[in-house]
Image: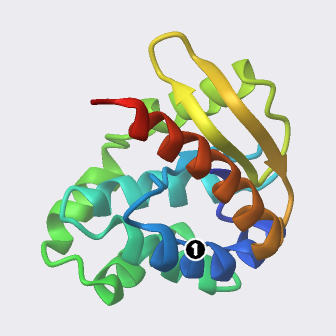
Amino acid sequence: EYSDFQCPFCKRVQGTLDKLREQYSKEVQFGYRHFPLDFHKEAKHMAESVECAREQGKFWELQKLLYASDSVSRAKLHQYAKKAGVRNIDRFKTCLKERKYKDRVLDDLKEGMKLGIRGTPTFILGTYDTDTRVVHGELLSGAVSKEKFKEVFEKYLSISRAEASLVP
């Protein structure tokens, strides 16, 4: 998933993704890449904040809270982190202040652009070779329905299962 915390379509699809993670977590790897759009003023800082939360094992918790909120100012990110269960708030604040994950967020954005991504949310479904940066599958954009996700998941899972059955 390439996403932006201030994108309304990204917010809308999160409930669907939560249900899919529950259903497919044993067979499907869910990844998250940052794609903060220039016109969303706080999106980069929000992206950096979830990376700071990741240091304390609270990436998904903060991600969920940020998508559930209407508007989050930079000044309130530490309050959301605390609510998400980040224990060492001083460490979190230092991480944000130093912009420790600025390059990681920008790298995600650059990688997405190389893949041809222009908007959010965009999903890579299938397989993605991180060495060659080749996608074997499909790119879906927008607030994709649960049914469409399941259709594509099942398509690639059936291929994967068939290949696994060939291995002695």
Where in the figure is residue 164, as x and y percent of width and height?
A: 40, 38
Residue, far top: 132
Q: Residue at x 73, y 73 (%)?
A: 13
Where in the figure is residue 155, as x and y percent of width and height?
A: 70, 50
Q: Residue at x 60, y 50 (%)?
A: 158
Where in the figure is residue 75, as x and y percent of width and height?
A: 48, 72
| Label 1: few (<14), some (14–19) or many (≥20) C-alpha neighbours in 10 Å | some
Q: Nearer the viewer, residue 1 or 3?
A: 1
Residue 120 shows in the view:
yes
Residue 158, compared with residue 113, is above or below; it is: below
Q: Quadrant of residue 150?
A: bottom right
User: Total number of numbered labels?
Assistant: 1
Residue 151, compared with residue 84, is above or below; it is: above
- Residue underneath mark 1: 20
Q: Quadrant of residue 38?
A: top right
Residue 82, compared with residue 4, is above or below; it is: below
In terms of secondary structure, where does tag 1 sit? helix
